[in-house]
Amino acid sequence: MAKEMSEEAIYAEAKRRVKERRDFYGHLAAYVGVNILLVFIWAFASGGGYPWFLWPLVCWGVFVLLHYLRIFVFERKGDRAAIEKEAEKIRKEQD
């Protein structure tokens, strides 16, 4: 059975999660802003010709989706187990 995390470990984990979420929202804001700019460039420069802006919109959108899934859908249980294992190793070295 997994051991309970110390208060310091809980704080560190919470800090890491907040940073990951903040990074995702920054990525999402850049995606939206740049793609709005590309649509405006397409609309005004080419007069509505071939919709070339869809290429970066879709390709970059896949990576934004993967980033979202990694942060909000899939838990990184393997990381938590590896951290606990390493922490236990350090505790044994200290004794």
Image: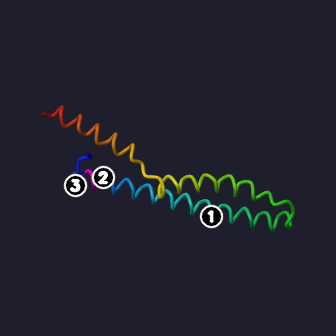
Instruction: Give me the residue at 22% from left, 35% from top.
Output: 90
- Horizontal and vertical percent position of residue 58: 70, 56
- Horizontal and vertical percent position of residue 50: 85, 59
Task: Give the mark nearer the N terminus: 1 vs 2.
Answer: 2
- Horizontal and vertical percent position of residue 24: 50, 58
> Which mark is in front, 1 or 3?
3
Real-space CA distance between mark 1 and mark 2, rounded to the nearest whole angstrom: 30 Å
Which label sits on residue 86? none
> Which mark is in front, 1 or 2?
2
Secondary structure under badge 3?
Answer: helix
Which label sits on residue 12? 2
**Residue type at the position of mark 1:** Val
Callout 2 environment at 10 Å: few (<14), some (14 to 19), or many (20+)?
Answer: few
Secondary structure under badge 1?
Answer: helix
Reading the image, the residue beneath label 3 is: 7
Real-space CA distance between mark 3 and mark 2, rounded to the nearest whole angstrom: 9 Å
